[in-house]
Image (cartoon, rainbow, N blue to C red):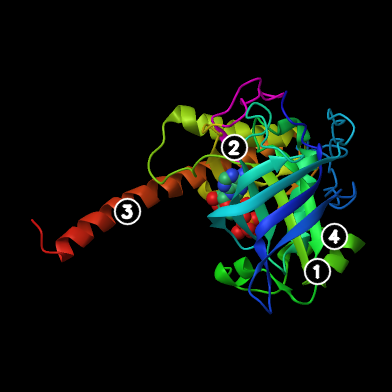
Amino acid sequence: MALAQNAIRSITLEGVVQDSATGGSVPVTLHRKNAPLDLVAPHHILRRPMAPVLLESTPERPPSRLPPPGTSHLRCHAGEFIGDGQSSIVFAADKVELDGAPPDARSVPRLVVKIARSNRLAALARDAWFYDEMECLQGSSIARCYGWFEAELTSDQVVPAWSDHPAENPDDHDHVLDIDETIHPDQLQRTARRDVLSILVLERLGDKLQPGRHPKSLRKDVMDLYKDASHLGIAIDEDVRRHNILGAPHQEPCLPSLTSPFTNRTHAWRVVDFEFGVKINYSIGQFKVSYEGHVNRMFRDTQEEGAGSVMHIYADSDESGSD
Ligand SMILES: Nc1ncnc2c1ncn2[C@@H]1O[C@H](COP(=O)(O)OP(=O)(O)OP(=O)(O)O)[C@@H](O)[C@H]1O
C-alpha cells in the first residue's frame, strides 16, 4: 500500500548541514510542521451587478482523505542537485530508509527534498499550505507531498547549498509577503529568521517541459492541470512557466498517476511551485479565461524559445565556419 502523505513525523537529513569549525557533515533531524489553515488569506473580489465571473466566496478546502497522522521516521541523504529557483534548492533524496529499513518500492516513490533558501522561509510555508489545500490533486495534477519539516540550526551549523547555488536575483525581501492583504503572524516571524532549515519532501517528478512546438493533446493536458486548480479556487496563473511543468513520474520506484477528481483524466504532466498562488473567488468561467491566456502565451514562448535555439545552433555553426 502506498505510504500516506502524512505518515512521516520526522526526518534525519544527511549531506545538507556542515559544522562550520570542522567542515564535517552533520546529520540533522527535522520535525513535521502543519501549516495553519489561515496561513493564506482568501482574496475576495467584490461582486458587482452584471459581473457573474465572481463567486460569493472562495470554495472550502475539501476534507482530507488521509488517515490519522503517522509516526514514521525517514532517513535520507541529499544527493544529486536537481534545480533551484528564487526560493529554494531541490535535491534528489538518496539512501532512503523508512523506520530503519529500505522502503518497499510499491509504497514509497523516488523523492526530492526542496530546501528553502535562508531568507525564503515564508515562501516555503506558503508552498506547503497550497500542497495541503490541493491534497485531492496530489498524484494527479501536482506532486505527492510527504510533508513540510523544519529544524533550528545552531550557530556553528551552516548550509553550503545556500551559497553554492545562489539565487539568480538575490533580493532579501520575500515577495510572498506582498500577496495577501493581511500577513499571517507566523509568516512575519519566519521572515525575521535565518537559522532554520525548512524543507518539503516531494515525490520526484520527470523532466521539465522542453522548448519547441507541442502537440494539441499535450497543450490540452497542461491546460487541464490548471483547470483542476480552478475547481479549488486557486490561481497560479502568474507562475505559468514551462519550468513549473514537469513530467509525471515514470522512473521506478514510482507510484501510479491518479485520475483527477475534476476532469476524471490521468495527466502526463504535473505543476510545481505554488508560493505565489492565490485563493480567489473567481468562477470557473473566469479561471478559464485567465488560465487560457497564460497557458497559450506560455506555449507561444516555448515555441519561440525552441525556434531561437535552432537559430542559435545555425548561428554557432556559421561562426565556426562550417558549411
Ligand atoms: N517534485 C519535483 N521533482 C523533480 N524536480 C523538481 C520537483 N520540484 C521542483 N523540481 C525542480 O526544481 C526546480 C526548482 O523548483 P521550484 O520552481 O519549485 O523552486 P522555487 O525556488 O520555488 O522557484 P521560484 O523561482 O519560482 O521561486 C524546478 O524548476 C524543477 O526543475
Mark 2 vs mark 4: in front: 2
Residue 191 badge: 1
Q: Which mark is residue 103?
A: none
Viewer-nearest of discs 4 and 1? 1
Residue 73, placed above or below residue 40? above
Q: Nearer the viewer, residue 44 or 26?
A: 26
Identify the residue position indicated by label 3 in the image.
309
Residue at disc 2, secondary structure: strand
- Range of residues picked out in magenta: 253-271
Percent of width and height locating residue 197:
75, 62
Q: Main secondary structure of the magenta part?
A: loop
Alpha carbons under labels 1 and 3: distance apart:
39 Å
Q: In terms of depth relative to the viewer, which is nearer, 169 or 128?
A: 128
Q: Which of the labelled discs sits on residue 181, or is there none? A: 4
Is the CB of mark 4 within 8 Å of ligand 1?
Answer: no
**76 falls in the magenta region:** no
Left or right of 58 on screen, residue 87: left
Residue neighbourhood size for the residue with mark 3, other residues' Cα within 10 Å, grouped as few (<14), some (14–19), many (≥20): some
Based on the displayed image, in which of its 4 quarters is residue 312 positioned?
bottom left
Residue 284 visible in the displayed image? no
Pointer 2 with pointer 4, Cβ within 8 A: no
**Label whose residue precedes the other's in the sequence (4 or 3):** 4
Q: What whole-number distance in Å separates the C-alpha atoms at marks 2 and 4?
A: 29 Å
Q: CA distance from mark 4 to mark 1?
A: 17 Å
Q: Given the current orientation, which residue lies at the most extreme top position?
A: 264
Q: Answer few, some or many: residues within 10 Å of disc 4's Cα (few below 14, many 20 plus, some between 14 and 19).
A: few
* Residue 298: % across, % down: 50, 46
The amino acid type, in three-letter code, at marker 4 is Glu
- SS for tag 3? helix
Q: Is residue 291 above or below residue 262?
A: below
In front: label 4 or label 3: 3
